[in-house]
């Protein structure tokens, strides 16, 4: 019983990933009706038809054909098609999927158009001739006679892929001519060619495009001229439950398809491939008395074209190397010139350092004098700014009161200009004071017993005009808290945080102000319903002159200094401040102080 249970578990374990990996695949009728859908493409590696390039991206003739098929569906039928690729472990799994899957799945891997396959799955019109040749390990070179060929196939390993036409060709050779053939199997054609190129006693069938793709890469393989085979053509396959063959055939028969295929063949197989393969295909068999000889000449032409291409690439590589040498020589010359100039500069620097040392002493003395003057200047600016702040605030309050009275339109206009000017002056004064605070190297604190509840209510009352103008309701939850802090700094902290919350909140919203006595800590929170803070901007939040993505909702001015001042004041009183925010859902600023 235990063994049976383990066996059942193993079967389920093997089948579960397959079941989970089967994504939804729509029929063509569903895509046409809905205007969009997904088509699953099952594939097994087969260069140059479908493979991963050096960057790990999917590429190949059939991959690019299907990319253009998506554009064809969009342009002709106005439907958006998403392709989802399912990689199968081997070619046999691809054939089994096409035979057994109940989903409308496409299969690609240069599938030969064979009549016997049409009862198991659907096959589109052929899009390219299908010529298959024998390749061998480089050790054999090209055998010159049938006797040598027979010796090669009988005494060495035949490598092939299960359920492929390559296997079928070898089995026919085994049945009709060489029963001694020893056959070994690999997952797919790319493994087949790699196995043959890395061995000295192997051979097998591949398609002509497979061979040319690897020939271009200078792999260690040889082509044998005997027993070349041609099938009806290469096609795209679909499951029997699929209706995609209808629109795929329309795509292949479209007048633009041939131009697309010519471009892809030239890109992956060389410019002459299409013409040469057409000339040696069975389509022209009635015009060619010696098909085998004609095919051999055609393949030789393709190999020559690839050799010419490699020669041109070698010439380009030599040219690049020569250019590199030329540039290296020029670089060395420039380095020598730079070294000479550097030597002269070092000598000049030694001569000038003496005079600079003397001047540095003079500059240090002048700096001390300038620092003293700068401190005096900052103190004067601070005094003037503080003296201006209160009368400006009073003038603004009076002006805003007058604006609610019954006055003429001209008076309203003039009063609006006065309020605008006063606001600008108030902003300038605030900016001067903020810069003065941030530029000071030290900050003196004056601790005293402060009724934080009373201070918070006073700040809220002072900002009532701003909150009322935007119809913002300030909701409070205040514990009775008295603590030893600097009253001047704590007023500025609450004022900056609350005025910020009002600035960045929308009309008819709420701002929650909370003051809590939490055992050994005092916690102050201001929570708004504004735009919130973007995650990538949070590290910049308390830096000087940082204006973030969120903007004041009523065009209010913002210097970008308020939060940096809050941080400096909080840390001066040994507290900490931070922000909790999710973008689009408001922001909560939290200040904590330890109780003394």
Image (tube, rainbow, N blue to C red):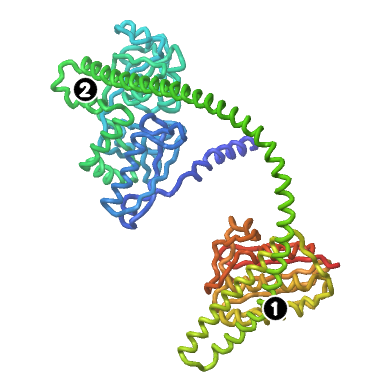
In this view of the protein, which residue sits in the foreground, 69 or 580?
Answer: 580
Quick check: 189 above or below 239? above
Task: Give residue 69's position: percent from left, percent from top.
Answer: 31, 44
> Image quarter for residue 121?
top left
Q: Residue at x 15, y 17 (%)?
A: 289
- Mark 1 in CB contact with mark 2 (< 8 angstroms): no
Residue 171 visible in this rendered orientation of the protein? no
Callout count: 2
Q: CA distance from mark 1 to mark 2?
A: 93 Å
In this view of the protein, which residue sits in the foreground, 409 or 160?
Answer: 409
- Give the mark toward the camera: 1 or 2: 1
Task: Give residue 548's position: percent from left, percent from top.
Answer: 57, 61
**Badge 2 is on which residue?**
280
Q: Residue at x 45, y 12 (%)?
A: 200
**Badge 1 is on which residue?**
459
> Image quarter for residue 425?
bottom right
Residue 165 visible in this rendered orientation of the protein? yes
For the N terminus, the image quarter is top right
In this view of the protein, which residue sits in the foreground, 461 or 527?
Answer: 461
Question: Which element type, helix, strand or loop, lies under badge 1?
Answer: helix
Task: Give residue 520's position: percent from left, percent from top.
Answer: 83, 66
Question: Which element type, helix, strand or loop, lies under badge 2?
Answer: helix
- For the residue carrying disc 1, how many other residues have a C-alpha within 10 Å: few (<14), some (14-19), or many (20+)? some
């Amino acid at each position: 019983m235990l063994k049976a249970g383990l066996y059942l578990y193993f079967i389920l374990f093997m089948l579960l990933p397959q079941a989970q990996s089967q994504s939804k695949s729509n029929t063509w009728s569903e895509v046409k009706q809905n205007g969009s859908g997904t088509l699953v493409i099952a594939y097994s590696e087969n260069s140059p038809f479908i493979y991963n390039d050096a960057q790990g991206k999917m590429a190949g003739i059939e991959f690019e054909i299907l990319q253009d098929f998506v554009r064809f569906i969009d342009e002709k039928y106005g439907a958006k098609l998403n392709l989802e690729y399912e990689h199968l472990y081997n070619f046999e799994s691809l054939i089994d999927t096409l035979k057994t899957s109940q989903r409308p799945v496409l299969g690609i891997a240069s599938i030969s158009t064979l009549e016997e396959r049409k009862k198991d799955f659907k096959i589109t019109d052929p899009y390219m001739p299908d010529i298959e040749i024998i390749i061998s390990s480089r050790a054999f070179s090209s055998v010159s006679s049938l006797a040598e060929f027979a010796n090669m196939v009988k005494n060495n390993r035949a490598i092939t892929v299960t359920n492929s036409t390559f296997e079928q060709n070898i089995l026919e050779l085994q049945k009709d001519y060489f029963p001694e053939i020893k056959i070994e199997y690999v997952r797919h054609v790319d493994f087949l060619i790699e196995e043959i190129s890395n061995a000295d006693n192997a051979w097998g069938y591949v398609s002509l495009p497979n061979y040319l793709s690897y020939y271009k890469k200078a792999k260690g393989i040889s082509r044998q001229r005997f027993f070349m085979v041609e099938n009806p053509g290469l096609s795209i396959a679909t499951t029997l439950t699929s209706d995609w063959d209808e629109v795929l055939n329309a795509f292949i028969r479209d007048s633009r398809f041939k131009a697309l295929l010519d471009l892809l063949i030239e890109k992956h197989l060389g410019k002459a491939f299409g013409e040469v393969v057409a000339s040696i295909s069975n389509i022209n068999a009635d015009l060619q008395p010696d098909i085998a000889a004609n095919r051999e000449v055609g393949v030789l032409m393709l190999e020559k074209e690839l050799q010419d291409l490699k020669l041109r690439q070698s010439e380009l590589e030599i040219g690049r190397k020569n250019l590199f040498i030329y540039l290296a020589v020029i670089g060395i010359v420039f380095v020598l010139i730079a070294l000479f100039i550097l030597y002269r500069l070092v000598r000049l620097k030694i001569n000038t350092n003496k005079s600079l040392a003397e001047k540095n002493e003079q500059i240090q003395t002048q700096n001390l004098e300038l620092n003293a003057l700068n401190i005096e200047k900052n103190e004067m600016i601070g005094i003037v700014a503080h003296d201006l702040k209160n009368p400006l605030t009073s003038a603004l309050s009076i002006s805003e009161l007058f604006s609610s009275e019954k006055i003429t339109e001209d008076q309203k206009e003039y009063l609006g200009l006065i309020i605008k000017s006063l606001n600008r002056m108030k902003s300038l004064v605030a900016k001067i004071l903020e810069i003065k605070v941030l530029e000071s190297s030290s900050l003196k604190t004056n601790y005293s017993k402060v009724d934080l509840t009373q201070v918070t209510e006073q700040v809220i009352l002072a900002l009532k005009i701003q909150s009322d103008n935007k119809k913002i309701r300030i909701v409070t939850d205040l514990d009775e808290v008295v603590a030893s802090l600097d009253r001047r700094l704590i007023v500025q902290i609450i004022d900056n945080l609350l005025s910020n919350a009002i600035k960045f909140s929308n009309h008819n919203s709420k701002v929650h102000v909370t003051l809590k006595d939490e055992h050994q800590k005092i916690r102050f929170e201001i929570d708004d319903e504004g735009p919130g803070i973007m995650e990538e901007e949070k590290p910049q939040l308390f830096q000087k002159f940082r204006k973030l993505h969120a903007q004041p909702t009523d065009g209010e001015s913002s210097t970008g200094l308020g939060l940096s001042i809050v941080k400096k004041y909080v840390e001066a009183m040994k507290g900490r401040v931070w922000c909790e925010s999710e973008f689009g859902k408001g922001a909560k600023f939290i200040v904590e102080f330890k109780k003394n």
